[in-house]
Amino acid sequence: MGQSMIDLPTRFLLNLKPWRNAATWHIAFSGGLDSTVLLHLLATLSKTESLPALSAIHVHHGLQAVADAWPEHCRSECAALSVPLQVLRVQVQPGASLERAARDARYQAFSETVQANEVLLTAQHRDDQAETLLFRLLRGAGVRGLSAMPGERPLGKGHLLRPLLDVSRAELVAYACAQGLNWIEDPSNQDHQYSRNYLRHQVFPTLTERWPQAVATMVRSAAHLSEAQGLLGDLAQIDLASVGTASEFDWLGLPSLELASFAQLSSARQRNALSHWLEPLTRLPDTDHWSGWESLRDATGDASPIWRLADGELHRSGGRIWWLSGHWLRPLPPVGTWLDPALPLALPDNGLLSFSGAIPDGPLQIRYREGGEVMALPGRGHRDLKRLLNESGVPSFVRGRLPLLYRDGQLLAVANLKGLDGGAIGDWHLHWQPQNEDQGLS
């Protein structure tokens, strides 16, 4: 069993030492064995130690009838320990994996609840870590996936902590029995159609019978892989620093990388750097779908290829790759007359438009490109807008969103483009500030 059971509260407290100054410790409390031990440990320690305020959160998925009684059990357990409890009800989206959908709904609820300078404590332990490693190995995960669960990570505005990762399931059972704790046995935990339950009840007993230290050694492997992932992250930062050069279209507020220097890296380093860059932006593709990156990278010079990912798209334009998501991918409603050009104009799903300098006489209209537009330029005569946009190097995905200023059916100005923004025909300029949307996952 390793370190003795008596040592458990001391070890546990040591793991939480860096977080003693947090405003609140939230406890993810399902009512099962693991989280019941977590709650009891914290409630007991808070009597003798100066800990942050404790608060429990029970997420009710409503997936099985038996679960309707669990919030009441959790309430009475928390009341007995004088720990306030919040019950959060969530809708689980139907999908291929019910386990994953329930987990996503649960963590979404947690991330919305945890505020700045607060932490959420969850009760995953050493055996869970080994199960996660084997489960992901069987799904063909790479180093990132096999480095298993981190002891802490950001969650919402706060942090998620797993202070029991160095504690075995056997130690938790021993503690719960010694303290006479009551917990819920979730019937779905015995259902072997769920992959993790099959691993827990069928595979691990056989493994540990032959190799008693299997769990400990697998957890050690996960730690090695976690270290390797850290080094790959360092390498990605080095590579991204060389390709994250400035662009004359940085005002778009979009993440982008220069393609020429990126293409000089080996394929493995490209995938590593790109994964690192994309991770905060989207769920990453599996190995089979990385061919989309090669198609984007290797397309001929004049093509505008797109790689569609779970939460957005990578576009290639003007020698760069660009990440587009949210409103950038939605069609734009028409705008029409600018009633008071002295005030900024809010463009639906497309930011703000304003003038600097003397405002041109009206009536003024705002339109978007449809094709075939012509613009009169001093000293250059009538020029095709498509050619003018080519000369300015405007990325292809921006062209349909660039606000165009009209008066009496004549195209007067194109926002933000030097020489076309009004400065050449008057003492004014048309400014467009694209909508600033958090590019990360909601």
Image (cartoon, rainbow, N blue to C red):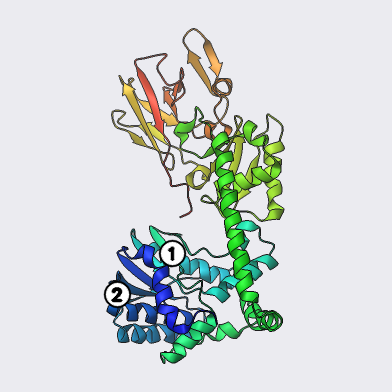
Tell me if residue 166 comes above or below residue 355 in the rendering: below
Provide residue 13's location: percent of width, then percent of height. Answer: 39, 72
Residue that badge 1 annotates: 160
Question: Looking at numbered disc 1 in the image, what kind of residue is underneath it?
Answer: Leu
Residue marked by disc 2: 49
Q: Position of residue 103 (x, y in %)?
A: 52, 69
| SS label for mark 1 | strand
Front-most of residues 189 and 315: 189
Residue 242 placement: quadrant: top right
Tag 1: Cα neighbours inside 10 Å, few (<14), some, or many (≥20)? many
For marks 1 and 2, give the CA distance.
21 Å
Q: Residue at x 39, y 87 (%)?
A: 73
For the N terminus, the quadrant is bottom right
Q: Image quadrant of residue 58?
A: bottom left
Nearer the observer, 164 or 336: 164
Q: How many marks?
A: 2
Q: Of callouts 1 and 2, which one flags the residue occurring earlier in the amino acid sequence?
A: 2
In the rendered image, residue 240, in percent from the top left (x then y), is placed at 56, 39
Residue 38 appearing in the image: no
